[in-house]
Amino acid sequence: MEMEAPVLAALAAVIIAFILLVLPHLRKQSSSQDDRRRQLPPGSFGLPVVGQTVGLLRALRANTGEAWLRRWASDAALTAKSSTSFNSMVGRRNIRELVGDDHRRVRAMMVQFLKLDIVRSYVASMDDEVRHHLRAHWDGRTTVAVMPSMKSLTFDIMCTVIFGLGRADHAAVRRELSAEFQQLVRGIWAIPVNLPFTSFGKCLAASRRGRRTVAAIIKEKRAKLESGHSSPSDDLMTHMLAEGLADEEIIDNVMFMMVAAHDTTASLLTFLLRHLDGNRDAYGRVVAEQQEVARSKAPGEALSWDDLGKMKYTWSAAMETLRLVPPVFSMLKRAVADVEFDGHLIPKGWQVLGAMNLTQQDPAIFPEPSRFEPARFESPIPPYSFVAFGGGARMCPGNEFTRVETLVAMHYIVTGFRWKLADGCDGSFSRYPMPSPAQGLLIDIEPIDTTTTGATGISK
Ligand code: HEM
């Protein structure tokens, strides 16, 4: 808490979601408690148990979440917390629920596979997965639904580089897990009513199937580790086994990582293509930058770490996409002690919803905030203004992984294909709570003849 408060206090906009059942308490308070109550942030508790969740979900689906949040906006300072539905889907011992030394220990294990010098070594495998995916799912097609395609690509990349589940030896397991995850992520913000016909109930069933598959993989990895056929540095699951984590704890954190690492980056890639389609100048600059990199390569040669350093404008366009359409719409936090902020009291135990959209669309920080303008990120921006990856001790450790994956994928898409939104696809989207474009963002594609552009191409 002490570590996070100053950082989170700097976040410009934090929204109060009053979902605790403390109202009866407040009525009985003494006069000093009444003063305390006057200090509470404005708003209402909403309905018992579900609080304001239903109203927010409705607004997200109609893509009016920002307007809904503005009605409740206040500023505050807090620590991480997951929703009941989220914990039901991924398991209660996931990293977001851990505090103090437990959090530091599990985070350190994950960071082993996400730190800069390790992510550098992923470039070749990511390059191979991207080319394989485009050959299998884009080559020879005239229309592609971008979101499902990117979800499948980012799921495969994550399986290969973080979990050591390669294409050759784990193809069936990857397909099985991918299907369960498509289903279970929809349950993360579902109303927690567990019946066979509710959305929550169906997603919970998918989560149980996913957990069984992960448990079987753990068994396989334990046997390899014990027989000396693998080492803890091979992949995250083997590392967690070697560190002595209980199986249930490994499963919860693997489930968390699988959610955290693939849907988010798939959303970024999808909306990056959508924004470039609508902004031809930015599109032209990205194409020019990528073709210059391609011209420096031999036909079929894989991208290197140095090549990614030359893709600065492409990454600015990705940051601008994350600013406009952050994959993680909000962060639920919990006060682990009474917190005072900006004249308000957030009592211990209260939950608070931090909304990055409000910060990232603040015209005082980003003039003309609804305009797509990657050049904003060519010069430094004020600290804690760009919060798509959160901030402080809980900041997303996958940001460098995201940068590398995005640049590798964009290189081959941009140099291999031209695209535009398909007729009838207007690029609109809803939130579930991940941004989901209508029709999965249907685009018409046309291959680029790489022999004339000098691009490396997707063939080997
Ligand atoms: C566009 C891509 C991504 C976005 C927008 C994103 C966003 C976020 C956000 C907002 C948080 C919460 C931060 C906070 O509480 O301050 C988070 C946490 C986390 N993310 Fe990401 N993420 C992305 C990709 C990834 C990837 C690729 C990985 C792993 C490979 C990853 C792993 C994690 C982990 C492990 C946490 C929990 C950190 C903790 O509680 O200590 N994320 N992410």
Image (tube, rainbow, N blue to C red):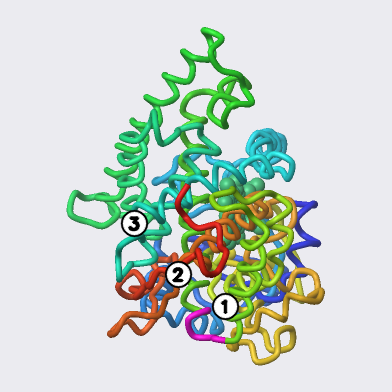
Q: Nearer the viewer, mark 3 or mark 2?
A: 2
Q: Quick check: is the Cβ at mark 3 less than 8 Å away from ligand 1? A: no
Q: Earlier in the sequence, mark 1 or mark 2?
A: 1
Which mark, residue 267? Answer: none
Residue occupying the point 53% across, 29% down: 237
Residue 321 place in picture, x, y as percent: 57, 74
Foreground pick, 22 / 229 = 229
Residue of label 3: 137
What separation in Å lies between label 3 and label 1 (alpha carbons)? 28 Å
Q: CA distance from mark 3 to mark 2?
A: 16 Å
Dot 2 corresponds to which residue? 448
Q: Nearer the viewer, residue 401 or 325?
A: 401
Is residue 278 on the magenta stretch?
yes
Q: Which is closer to the viewer, label 1 or label 2?
A: 2
Q: In the image shown, does 426 or 75 lie closer to the viewer?
A: 426
Question: Residue 437: x, y in percent?
Answer: 38, 73
Find numbered disc 3 in the image and state the secondary structure of the residue it sits on.
helix
Q: Earlier in the sequence, mark 3 or mark 2?
A: 3
Give the residue number, with chain letter if any, for mark 1. 324
> In this view of the protein, can residue 280 be seen by the observer?
yes
> Residue 17, image x and y in percent?
53, 69
Q: Is residue 199 above or below residue 167?
A: below
Pick the residue in front: 380 or 106: 380
When asked about the image quadrant of residue 367, the answer is bottom right
Q: Provide the residue span drawn in magenta.
A: 276-280
